[in-house]
């Protein structure tokens, strides 16, 4: 992905929107492009996140297992940041992330590259953190909505 394509991707998906073309050109040097096929594992339950990823193309699926059964938790598509929770808190992942669609293209930011970015280009690193906060906010809002709908279904409207 060229820096110009990366800039357009950020603008279209409202990611790191305040970065200039020059900032994105710098950031591009810190990212690695990964292409996966359906079923390829991005990270597994129990792994500590050493990378976070921007989804450029395709869908990523999230599954969890209790040791016997596997349950699909959800999917994320282009324009989303994934893997940021374990990346920042160093707690083992609670879900498996894998390529859900036929082809998935990701931009990977590894921990060593992020550490360099923080020192050499703090403005860009802050933009990534802000994007991670927005990503987590979307996740919490969606989860809150799901829980609310489930509670409404179980209890019925107006009953307490």
Image (tube, rainbow, N blue to C red):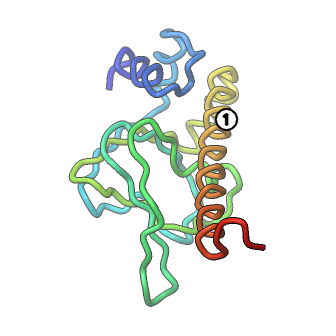
Please rate how many residues cluster around mark 1, counting C-alpha atoms within 10 Å: few if below 14, some from 14 to 19, many from 20.
Answer: some
Q: Residue furthest front?
A: 158
Residue 154 percent location from the top left of the image = 62, 76
Residue 48 percent location from the top left of the image = 59, 62
Residue at position x 30%, y 45% in the image: 58
Q: Residue furthest right?
A: 160
Residue at position x 48%, y 40% in the image: 80
In the image, 149 versus 99, the foreground residue is 149
Q: Which residue is mark 1?
A: 129
Left or right: 41 in relation to 124 = left
Residue at position x 64%, y 26% in the image: 127
| SS state under label 1 | helix
As drawn, 114 above or below 41: above
In the image, 96 versus 28, the foreground residue is 96
Left or right: 148 in relation to 102 = right
Q: Quadrant of the N terminus?
A: top left
Q: Quadrant of the C terminus?
A: bottom right
Occupied quadrant, residue 94: bottom right
Residue 139 percent location from the top left of the image = 60, 50
Occupied quadrant, residue 41: bottom left
**How many numbered badges does the structure rendering display?**
1
As drawn, 119 above or below 19: below
Residue 150 percent location from the top left of the image = 60, 68
Q: Residue furthest left?
A: 102
As drawn, 58 above or below 74: above
Residue at position x 52%, y 85% in the image: 66
């Amino acid at each position: 992905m060229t820096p110009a394509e990366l800039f357009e991707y950020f603008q279209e998906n409202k990611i790191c929107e305040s970065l200039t073309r020059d900032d994105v050109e710098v950031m591009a040097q810190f990212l690695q492009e990964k292409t996966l096929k359906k079923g390829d594992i991005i990270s597994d339950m129990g792994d500590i996140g050493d990378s976070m990823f921007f989804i450029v193309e395709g869908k990523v699926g999230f599954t969890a297992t209790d040791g016997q059964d596997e349950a699909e938790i959800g999917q994320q598509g282009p324009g989303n940041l994934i893997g940021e929770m374990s990346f920042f808190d160093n707690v083992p992942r609670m879900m498996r992330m894998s390529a859900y669609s036929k082809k998935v293209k990701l931009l990977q930011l590894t921990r060593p590259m992020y550490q360099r970015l923080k020192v050499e280009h703090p403005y860009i690193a802050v933009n990534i953190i802000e994007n991670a906060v927005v990503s987590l906010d979307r996740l919490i809002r969606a989860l809150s909505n799901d829980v609310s709908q489930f509670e409404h279904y179980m209890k019925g409207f107006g009953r307490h």
